[in-house]
């Protein structure tokens, strides 16, 4: 069975804040379950979030430049 992580542990692995992890959970982008009042995230779900789902590169026009 996959290891479950606390929000703080998941945040450390993603190099972000705990609030960011909770926001991802509330937005439905990161599956989680509750243990008491705390969220727990499966390590496999966290790894799936870290892996890009597509290999698209930056598209022309991105970057905030002004077109003439």
Image (spheres, rainbow, N blue to C red):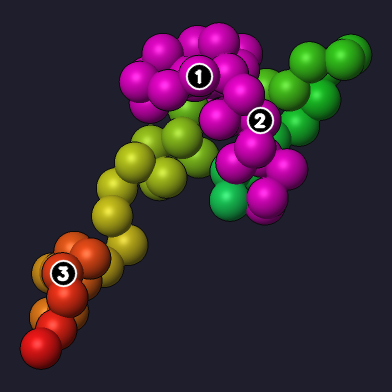
Q: Name the residue under label 3.
A: 65
Rendering coords of residue 32 (x, y %): 69, 35
Residue 32 left/right relative to 4: right
What is the CA distance from the residue labelled 2 to the residue labelled 1?
9 Å
The disc label shown at residue 22, or none: 2
Marked residue nearer the N-terminal end (1 or 3): 1
What is the CA distance from the residue labelled 1 to the residue labelled 3?
30 Å
Marked residue nearer the N-terminal end (2 or 3): 2
Q: Residues within 10 Å of mark 1 (few under 14, many from 20)?
A: some
Residue 34 left/right relative to 11: right
Rendering coords of residue 5 (x, y %): 56, 17
Q: In this view, does 47 lie above or below 43?
A: below
Residue sitting at 34 percent across and 41 percent down?
A: 50
For mark 1, give the secondary structure: loop
Rendering coords of residue 56 (x, y %): 18, 72
Residue 5 falls inside the magenta stretch:
yes
Q: Nearer the viewer, mark 1 or mark 3?
A: 3
Circles 2 and 1 in contact, beta carbons < 8 Å: no
Magenta stretch, residue numbers: 1-28
For mark 3, give the secondary structure: loop
Rendering coords of residue 21 (x, y %): 57, 29
Q: Name the residue under label 1.
A: 17
What is the CA distance from the residue labelled 2 to the residue labelled 3?
33 Å
Circles 2 and 3 in contact, beta carbons < 8 Å: no
For mark 2, give the secondary structure: helix
Which of 3 and 27 lies nearest the eye of the viewer?
27
């Amino acid at each position: 069975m996959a290891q479950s992580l606390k929000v703080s542990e998941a945040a450390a692995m993603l190099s972000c804040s705990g609030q960011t992890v909770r926001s991802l959970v509330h937005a439905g982008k990161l599956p989680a379950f509750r243990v008491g009042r705390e969220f727990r995230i499966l390590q496999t779900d966290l790894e799936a979030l870290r892996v890009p789902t597509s290999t698209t590169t930056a598209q022309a026009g991105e970057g905030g430049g002004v077109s003439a």
